[in-house]
Structures are given as structure tokens and as C-alpha cells.
Amino acid sequence: MIRNFGQRTTLDRRQFLKAASGVLTGVIGALSPLCALVPSRSWALEMRTLSSSQAATLLAMVRTMLPHDGLEEAAYALVVGALDGEAAGSPAARTRLDQGIAGLGPDFAAQPEASRVAALRAIESGEFFQSVRTTSLFVLYDNPIAWAHFGYEGEAFSKGGYLYRGFNDLKWLPDVPLAASGPMPGK
């Protein structure tokens, strides 16, 4: 429940996430020069080590590797930010990213999806691809933006567990007569 000038207004989780992502997008977009590079209003990050074109290439790579229609670009941008952070913390990671991105070519992000898939298949056994893939899996699927897209409400322990939060309701199964269940154990 959120108070609004003395009135009580109910706001469910989905409405809150929509409002919060709009505010977050505006704040991030207003503070970053990268917002002009991406046609979507969804993300903008300040890169510490990667150039704007390298970030755009990584974004296209991650989106091609893990495509989800309708998933906000901001979720993919978090992966690029994590890769940038890895590069900032390790000269070896920075070299691997620089060389891998250069190997994809300067126009990778502008290529059609079929061409991007073919380029990624050619390097999928390499260290660059595998390191980006590993980071992408951990970062993309472990953030609230992706959770909201997939309908995952997060962990249940802090909310009282699953039993009283819909885990035990079987509304999606047809009713079965008790006699069809057979004898009860121990009787």
C-alpha cells in the first residue's frame, strides 16, 4: 500500500514494476551519453572500459545468444555492464573482450539475425564466447527485470514460503473424486 497525500492507494507488484522501470529508465537515460546509441528507451549505462561501439556489439551478441521477445533491453544492458565491470577488474578479461569483439567485426550489431547467429556459431567453442555466455546466463536470469517478464515473483522464503502463496492450489487440474484416489496409506 502506498500513501499519496493522505489517500490510500493499492498498487500491485506488476503496476509497481512498470512505474519503477519507467522512472529508472528516465534517470539512467538522462545521466548517460550512451542513450543516443540505442534506439530503445530501455537502457543506458556508463561504460568504464568498453567503447560505445563495443558495448553495442556485446548487446547484440547477448540478445542473439539469449533471445526473448518482449524482454526489455535494460535486462540485456545489465549483462553488458557486468562484462564491462569484469573488463575493468581484470586485464586478461579486458584483452579477451577486446579481441573477441574485434573478431566479430565493427558491423556485427547491424547485421541481420541470421548472420549474427552464423558468426556466433563459428566461435561458440572459444573462450570469448564461453565467458560472455556464462556471464550472460548468470546476470540476465538473475535480475528483477527478467523476473517480471517471465512472471517469476522471486524467492518465497521472505514472503512466508510457497504453501500459502499458490503452490498448493490446483485450480488448473480437474476435480478428481476422492474414491478414485484409492485407499489411504496405513488404513
Image (cartoon, rainbow, N blue to C red):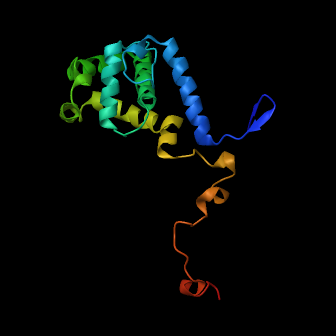
| Residue name at image x 67 percent, y 58 percent | 164
| Residue name at image x 45 percent, y 19 percent | 44
- In terms of depth relative to the viewer, which is nearer, 85 or 40? 40
Position in image of residue 28 (x %, y %): 52, 18
Q: Quadrant of the N terminus?
A: top right
| Residue name at image x 18 percent, y 34 percent | 118
Q: Quadrant of residue 56?
A: top left
Is 72 positioned to the left or the right of 130 in the image?
right
From this view, report whether residue 93 is shown above or below residue 68. above
Q: Quadrant of the C terminus?
A: bottom right
From this view, report whether residue 36 is shown above or below residue 69. above
> How many numbered marks, from 0 up?
0
Position in image of residue 143 (x %, y %): 51, 35
Q: Is residue 131 visible?
A: no
Is 95 positioned to the left or the right of 4 in the image?
left
Position in image of residue 4 (x %, y %): 75, 30
From this view, report whether residue 180 is shown above or below residue 107. below
